[in-house]
Image (cartoon, rainbow, N blue to C red):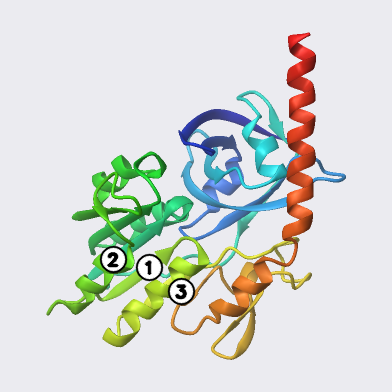
Amino acid sequence: MNQILFKERLAPEVYRMRVRAPLIAEERKPGQFIILQLDTEFGERIPLTIADADVQEGSITIIFQVAGKSTKLLAGMEPGQKIANLVGPLGRPTHIEQFGTVVCVGGGIGMAPLYPIAQGMKEAGNRLIVIIGARTKELVILEPEMRALADEVIICTDDGSYGRKGLVTEPLQELCAQGAKPDLAVAIGPPLMMKFCSLATRPFGVPTVVSLNTIMIDGTGMCGGCRVTVGGKTKFVCVDGPEFDGHQVDFDQMIQRLGSYREQERIAAAGCNLHAEAVRKGLQE
């Protein structure tokens, strides 16, 4: 059992937790993830990036957004409680070396998997530029952590409530159009964001890495639920990724497959909300 050591709310419906997992903390590398399960018999298996690790404490840090039943239940847990099942580290680590100038682009909760990659790129001696994107100011996460790492931080919000108004693709394209264009771009966030970041860098020949978060069950390549098409070939995000060449990913197919169980997800989330409301009313009576 993996005990929750710490919990905090970073933004509306976004939480950071430290969980005891000493063996994973020792082995994890940037870009890797875990799969957790709150109920070993019927619980959904949720893939989450390892956002950080503390080997001395024997803990890993996860950052997640409430999106459905399982993440809502996870958000309701408190320090001292235990997660029934946690497996990792999974996936291929990020390839990190001294490229030169690396621009890391994060959209929303995509900042969580981006953080350890940015750490690794900076430690390797790269000049690091970070672009943070969110719908509004209150949804911007990990800004202090990124400012402590990066040579330059650019913040974009859809509504202009913080930083510059607009999409992350705009400053990314501006950086690529400069004489000294970036040597590498890493983009992590919603599928549409990653798609258009890849389209923005392609004309300038800037290599672009994306980290995909697809439907995933076992995390070992057996179920095939996480399959994507990359360069015309079928790949499995859990074992071949989660990182791929953004210029080769078939994002349209991936986005279509992500909606396969939307109705089931809606029903499960609605049932969880009804249960929570019933519990709340029972406590008030």
Task: Note whether 16 is above or below 159 in the view shown.
Answer: above
Label 2 near label 1: C-beta < 8 Å?
yes
Residue 163 in the figure: left or right of residue 139: left
* Image quadrant in which you'd find residue 236: bottom right
First of labels 3, 2 by sequence position: 2
Residue 285 in the figure: left or right of residue 124: right
Helix, strand or loop status at disc 2: strand
Helix, strand or loop status at disc 3: helix
Q: Which residue is mark 3?
A: 195
Q: CA distance from mark 1 to mark 2?
A: 6 Å
Task: Note whether 65 is above or below 205 in the view shown.
Answer: above
> Can residue 44 be seen in this snapshot?
no
Marker disc for residue 103:
2
Q: CA distance from mark 1 to mark 3?
A: 12 Å
Marker disc for residue 91:
none
Helix, strand or loop status at disc 1: strand
What residue lies at 75% left-to-right and 40% top-to-bottom? Answer: 38
Q: Residue furthest bottom?
A: 232
Label 3 near label 1: C-beta < 8 Å?
no
Q: Which residue is mark 1?
A: 186
Label 2 near label 3: C-beta < 8 Å?
no
Looking at the image, which is closer to me, 168 or 125? 168
- Amino acid type indicated by mark 2: Val
> Can residue 70 be seen in this snapshot?
yes
